[in-house]
Amino acid sequence: MSNTLNITLTKSLIGRPDKHRGVVRGLGLRRLNQTVVREDTPETRGMVNKIKHMLKVT
């Protein structure tokens, strides 16, 4: 099994820029406290780094 990331949205999207909303949607997150499992790739890491203040990654 390859390395995976558990990504949880911990902050609301209210008042956030459209770019942040797009990244959240691109990660597959739809609601607060939702967790998705994504493969640990440079693309995923880049998306996480853009909005790391809104996420919890394990």
Image: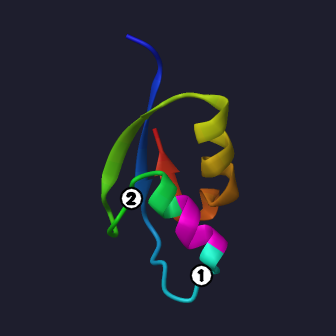
Q: Which residues are magenta?
A: 19-23
Q: Nearer the viewer, residue 31 or 10?
A: 31
Picture quarter with the C terminus: top left
How packed is label 2: few (under 14 Cα within 10 Å), some, or many (20 or more)?
Answer: some
Residue 46 occupies quadrant: top right
Which label sits on residue 29?
A: 2
Sequence-wise first label, 1 or 2: 1
Q: Is residue 11 left or right of residue 41?
A: left
- Principal SS element in the magenta part? helix
Question: Would you place residue 8 above or below residue 4 in this image?
Answer: below
* Local SS, label 1: loop
Residue 4 occupies quadrant: top left
Asked whether residue 46 is drawn in magenta, I would say no
Residue type for callout 1: Arg
Alpha-carbon distance for marks 1 and 2?
A: 15 Å
How packed is label 1: few (under 14 Cα within 10 Å), some, or many (20 or more)?
Answer: few
Asked whether residue 20 is drawn in magenta, I would say yes
Percent position (x, y) of residue 44? 58, 39
